[in-house]
Amino acid sequence: MAKYIFSTNQKFPPGKRRCTFCTNQMKDIDYKDVKTLKHFLNAFRKIKGHYYTGVCLNHQKKLSNAIKRARHMALVPFTN
Amino acid sequence: MTKKEEVAEESVAEMQGYEVMLILKPTLLEAAVGKKLKEFDEFIKSAGKVTAQDNWGKRRLAYRIKQCDEGVYVVYNIEIPPSFTKEVNQHLQIDPEVIRHLIMAIPEGYIYTKFSEEPDQEEEKPARKAPSAVKPRAAIKKKEVKPAEAPKDEGIAPSPEALDAKLNKLLEGEDLNI
């Protein structure tokens, strides 16, 4: 688990947001740090679309993998 | 045949890093948990080695698993040949005191930091704290300036007398060769 800097880029409209993982130069996403994963979950704890979060497709794949692992280990709920 | 032999040799020689996460039953006592982990250690050391072990302690689960609301989380970083993962999986599946487990290949350049050594797990609030963080800095600077001035005045006042005394001592005590 590494500490991750996270910034929500809300000032851009959806569709023009930048990938936060690319800007912070993070190659891999860890399933253990729930803090960062929470930003990409809905109120119903579903995974948000990359259109609204601005995550690039390369990182979206890794993110969804990490969230699914966290769900399996009961760090994050499936539903709320 | 030769190819198969080569592959077998390579698999024995090549070790890959894996991360194993276990959730143990919350009803286990600390001694029982220690025993369980020792057994697992020895089981892995028969084929590879353990690079890191971290016990997170008792944590609340996000949902109920096998009538348990809590679980003891343990994280292992190990190095074993890829063919041995099947046996590890079986070993954990059979165990009734392990509620859930996960085996994952470690990506390149991954460094494990212990759970207890992580900075500010719950107090982290990025971005919005930035303006509030500026104010105390300014306050500290002002505070620093005031005490810095006071000792200077004190330092200058006694200095001429002390310096004179020192000079006299030096002149009396030692012969100067110039």
Image (tube, helix red, strand yellow):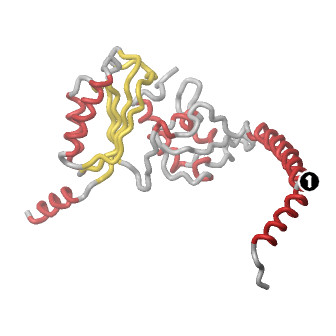
| Residue A5 image point, x, y percent | 61, 45
Q: Which residue is denoted by mark 1 in the rendering?
A: B157
To which chain does the residue with label 1 belong?
B
Residue at 46% x, 23% y: name it: B62
Q: Residue extending furthest top?
A: B67
Locate residue B46: give its quadrant.
Answer: top left
Can residue B100 be seen here? The reply is: yes
Q: Quadrant of the C terminus of chain B?
A: bottom right
Locate residue A48: give its quadrant.
Answer: top right
Q: Residue extending furthest front?
A: B172
User: Label 1's element?
Assistant: loop
Q: Residue extending furthest left?
A: B1
Instruction: Tell me: A21 left or right of B146.
Output: left
Amino acid, disc 1? Ala
Residue at 35% x, 36% y: name it: B21
Instruction: Tell me: B63 left or right of B169.
Output: left
Residue at 43% x, 22% y: name it: B61
Residue at 88% x, 47% y: name it: B150
Pointer 1 local density, CA inside 10 Å: few below 14, some 14–19, many at least 20: few
Instruction: Tell me: A14 left or right of A25.
Output: right
